[in-house]
Image (cartoon, helix red, strand yellow):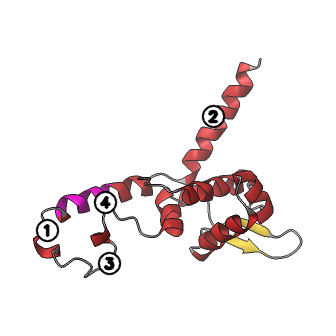
Amino acid sequence: MELIHRNTDYALRALLHLASLGNGRTGASAELAARTNVSLPFARKLLRQLARRKIITSVRGVAGGYRLAGPPSGISVLCVLEAVQGRLAVNRCFVSQGLCARKARCPLRRRLGAIQEALRRSLARVPLSAFLRSRRGRKSAAGQSKS
């Protein structure tokens, strides 16, 4: 079972590309589809999901496209995951109130709830900017090895 589904991976990659453009520049949906190696309709669907959650904004016009709605340091992996996949839950019973009749006496709920909150906190602490730093480090290391 995957915690981060493939569509979330693609969304993160598209966001990294937008962040790398810098200065609020926009990226067209076709460009983002090509960069993430997905079909244009699928890329558009992901971009709409991200825009709905106000992670990116859409810009109309000739130089239009999408751009980050805020700084990469303000966009967490949890935020992206939940925008694309829905609320993170380690078990069905955490998805909706009243879903489980055993809630009050369940021997698993307390521990699973603690695991879920630990996962949420961990993912919330990882901003998009952390991936940018690691990408820049790899690029500069590659450039130094050539000299």
- Disc 1 crowd rating (10 Å Cα; few below 14, some 14-19, many 20+) is few
Residue 61 at x, y = what percent? 86, 75
| Residue labelled with disc 3 | 96
Observer-nearest of 110 and 102: 102
Q: Secondary structure at mark 4?
A: helix
Disc 2 secondary structure class: helix
Closest to the camera, between mark 4 and mark 1, is 1
Q: Is residue 87 above or below residue 7?
A: below
**Nearest to N terminus: mark 4 or mark 3:** 3
Q: Please give the residue where the numbered disc 4 appears in the rendered image.
A: 116
Q: Which segment did they paint magenta?
A: 110-118
Kind of residue indicated by mark 2: Gly
Prevalent SS, magenta region: helix
- Residue at horizontal 60 percent and vertical 68 percent from the top: 55
Q: CA distance from mark 1 to mark 3?
A: 16 Å
Foreground tag (1 vs 2): 1
